[in-house]
Amino acid sequence: MTDPLRISVPSGPQIVAAIYETVLRPELVDRFCVAQQVAPLGKVAPLPVASESVLQASEVASHFSRSLEILEQKWRQLGCPDPLVALADPIQNDWAEAGPTGARGWLLLDLERRPLRCCQSFLAGVPTAGMSTPEGSAVGAKLATGEGGPLSALELTEAASGALREFTRHILGPEFSWQDFRVLETFLPDKILLCRPVWVGPSAQADSQAAALVDVQSRVETSRQPAAGAVALMIEVLDAAWPVGSADCIAGTFGLGPQEVDLLQQCLTGQAQETDLSQALSLSAAKVGIPGAVELIRLAGFLLREAAQDLAISQGLQLPPSFLVIGDAGEDTQCFRLGAETGQPVIFVHGMIDGIAGVQRLQGQLRTSGFRVYAPMRGGYGASRPVPGTNQQLNAYVAQIEALIDQENLQRPILLGHRSGAIFARAIALQLRGRIGGVVGVAPELPLKQTRNYKNLRGHQKGLAICASYLPVLVPLVLKSWSRSVRRRGAATLVRRQAQPGSRALAEINAMELDPVLGLSHALLMQQAGAGFLADLALSKLGDWLQTAQNMAPTIYLCGQEETSLPQEGLYPALKGEEKIQTRICAEAGNVLFYVRPELVLAALEELATEPPPATGVL
C-alpha cells in the first residue's frame, strides 16, 4: 500500500485532467497569432526514447492537441482577437466555457514594464485607473508602473527584477525567439513567475487586415527581431512546490532522467542557474509528447502543487475545501470535497468519534484512484444546521444527502459509512434506493439500544453512552470533560482507545502521527458545542423501514472480528434473495480498520464502482 503521507505518481486520468486544466486558459491564446507561428523555431535534434512513464508520449500529445483545438475554437468564435483584445474582457467574451480560469494570476507588460492587462487576482488593493481588466472596460491609456502598482503585486526578488530587465533587452536583440522564456523568483509563497514574449502587434487574422498579415510574415521571415511595440511580456503566476518525493514522482510521471528532473526542479523552485533553458527543457518535453518547455513547466508545477495540497490535507495541516448544500427547507449542510475532480462519486458518511479524519488521510490515494468524494456533515456537526429533533436524525440526514445529490447532480454515488455512519448509510440506501450505486460500511457500529452493546466502548465514550440512556441531564457535562481530555492527551487518543489492547492494530496506530488530522475533526465535532454528537447519542428508534431489505444496493461490510455478530444484532435483517450483502472480516483490525487497512476500503470502492459484488449473501 502506498504511504498516504508521501506523494505518489499520479494516475493517467489525473494527468489528462491536468493537461486540460493547464491549457484551457485565455492568457494562452497568443500562440495562435500568425506572427508567432511563422517565427523561426530552430531545429530539434533526434529524440531518445523516453523511459517508462504513466502515459505514452502519443497519448500525451493527443490530449495536448485536443485541448489546444478546444482553445483555438473558442478563440476563433470570438473573431481571432489579438491578446490585447482577447484579454480585455474574457468574462464578457464567455471564456469560462473554454475551461477553468480560477484563481490564477497573470500580468501583461509592455517592454517598458508598464501594465497593459492583468487578471482579477491582481486587482485587490492595486490601483488600476486607465488599465483594461477582465472586469473593466478598456480605456486606452496605460497605467505607469509605480509604488503599489500591479507589478509590485508580483513581489519580485532583486535577482528576478534584474533577470526581467535582461530578458527585455534580449527580446530586442538579434537572438530573440518566440520560444524564449525566463523563470523568475518571487516572494509569493509556493509560486514562480513564468515570463515569455507575446505578440501584440496588428491583428494578423481578420480578413479586413490581410495587408497586415503580409507585412507581418515578410518582416518575421527576414528577421527574428520584432518591432518594440509589437511584443509584450506575459508574466504568469504558477503554482510551484517540491515536497518530499517530488523527484521520484516527476521521474515516474514523465519518464525523465535525473539531470532532466534536476533542471525541472530548479525551474519549479525558482533557482534555475541557466538563463536560457528553452532548448534543454524543450527536448525533455518532446520526449513525452508535450509541445514545449513552458507547457512542461505548467503541467509539472500543477501536478506537484496538487500533490503538495493533497499531502497537507492528508497530514491534517489543513481541512479539505468545503461548500454549502442548501436543502428545500433552507437547512445548511457543510460538505467537504476530497479526492479527484472528476470520476466515480462517493459520499462519505462520518461517524461520531473521528469525523472525516479517516477519509481525509486518504486524499492522495482517492485522487489517484479517481474517486470524487463528498463528506457532508450531519446537522450539529461543523457548520451544518439545524440540529435534528428527537428520533429525526435518520430522516434529516437522508434529506441532506438527497439535497447534495440534486445540487451536484451525482449519478448513483457509492455510500462509504464509517462506524456509526454505516447506520446512516444503510438508511440512505434504503430510502433513496435506485439513486445509490452501492454501500461500503467500514467497522460498522450498532445503535446502542441495549446495555450489552456498551461492552466494546471505553472511557468517556462509554460514560457518554450510559448517560445518554439513563442520565441524559449529565451528558453535556460528560461531553465537555471528554473534549478536555482529548485536547490534553492529544487527538490521536480518539482512535487509539478504539483499538484492542495488545493488538497489532494498536501498535500500528501508535506509530502514526494522527494528532493533527484528528484534531481538525474533533474541532468540527465541537464547533456547535457537540450538538450533533448529542443528537447521535439519542439515536435509538431506527424505524421499520430500516429493517427491510428489498432492492437495496450492493453492500460490502468491512469488519473486525468483534463485529462478526452484526447480522444477528440487527444492523441488517436476515438476508433475502433480493439483497446483495457481503461481510469481510479482517483479523485484529477491528474498529480502526480505516486507518490500518485502507487498501481494503479502496478495493471495496473499486469493486462497487466497476461492477456489483459477484455473489449474493454473506461471505
Image (spheres, rainbow, N blue to C red):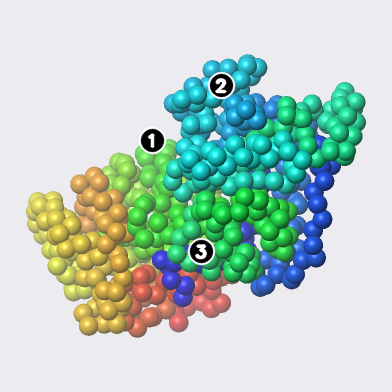
Image point 56% across, 54% down: which residue? 272
Q: Residue 307 appears at what percent x and percent y?
A: 49, 58
Q: Nearer the viewer, residue 257 or 590?
A: 257
Q: Is residue 611 visible?
A: yes
Reply above or below: 439 against 66.
below
Image point 40% across, 56% down: which residue? 313
* Distance CA(mark 1)–CA(mark 2): 49 Å
Please, what is the three-letter code of the amino acid marked with disc 2?
A: Ala
Residue 610: mark: none
Side (left or right) of 193 relative to 64? left
Please, what is the three-letter code of the amino acid marked with disc 1?
A: Gly
Q: Residue 487 appears at what percent x and percent y?
A: 18, 57
- Which residue lies under the disc numbered 1? 330
Residue 246: mark: 3
Q: Which of 31 and 563 is in front in this view?
A: 31
- Which residue lies under the disc numbered 2? 144
